[in-house]
Amino acid sequence: MLTSMLCLAFPLLLLYAAWQDVSTMLISNWVSALLALLFLPAAFAAGLTMNEIGWHLVFGAIVLAVCAVLFYLNVFGGGDAKVIAAASLWIGLSAVAPFAFWMAVAGGVLAGVLLALRKMKLQSEKAWLARLLNPEEGAPYAVAIAIGALVAAPASPVLAAGLSAMA
């Protein structure tokens, strides 16, 4: 039960990050911090060994370093970099392939939809929608991050334990 409750934070925080990114094009630092912080109790509750937890932490640190470089190169925003790194703690090496694949697919679809909508030169009174339709703005990539992480979740040992505890 505890494992399931801790693991429930993973999708909820990712969905909140996606919503916040769509509505403001910013992701609060507390979202990534809480996502990263909750990994340890969830991993212990899921029964991971210290060695397995260590590998998740090393993987998360490597992802954070890579994302910091990509942020510096202006590939994506700082909030996106932090959410990817925090989600990577939970995902681990065992689920990195589906995470990266589905995040890339979702990001491509998101970019395609935004490009098509922006080409139509639509207007909106709503600030969040006007921002999304503005060709000068970026894309709310936390949507793609959330999709990739949620699809990859069953391949993660931590999240798989949370899912099986619900059954």
Image (spheres, helix red, strand yellow):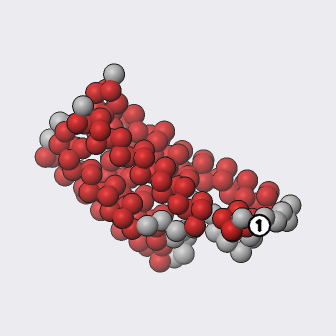
Residue placed most toward the observer, 20 or 154: 20
What residue is at 46 percent from the left and 71 percent from the top?
78
Residue pushed farthest top?
167
In this view, 14 is above or below 29: above
Quarter of the rendering occupied by the N terminus: top left
Badge 1 crowding class, 10 Å Cα cut-off, few under 14, some 14 to 19, many 20 or more, is: few
x and y, in percent, of residue 73 in the image: 51, 76
Visible residue check, residue 93: no
Q: Which residue is mark 1?
A: 125
Quarter of the rendering occupied by the C terminus: top left
x and y, in percent, of residue 43 in the image: 22, 43
The answer to which image quadrant residue 22 occupies is bottom right
Residue placed most toward the observer, 68 or 45: 45
In this view, 11 is above or below 87: above
Q: Amino acid at mark 1?
A: Glu
In this view, 28 is above or below 3: below
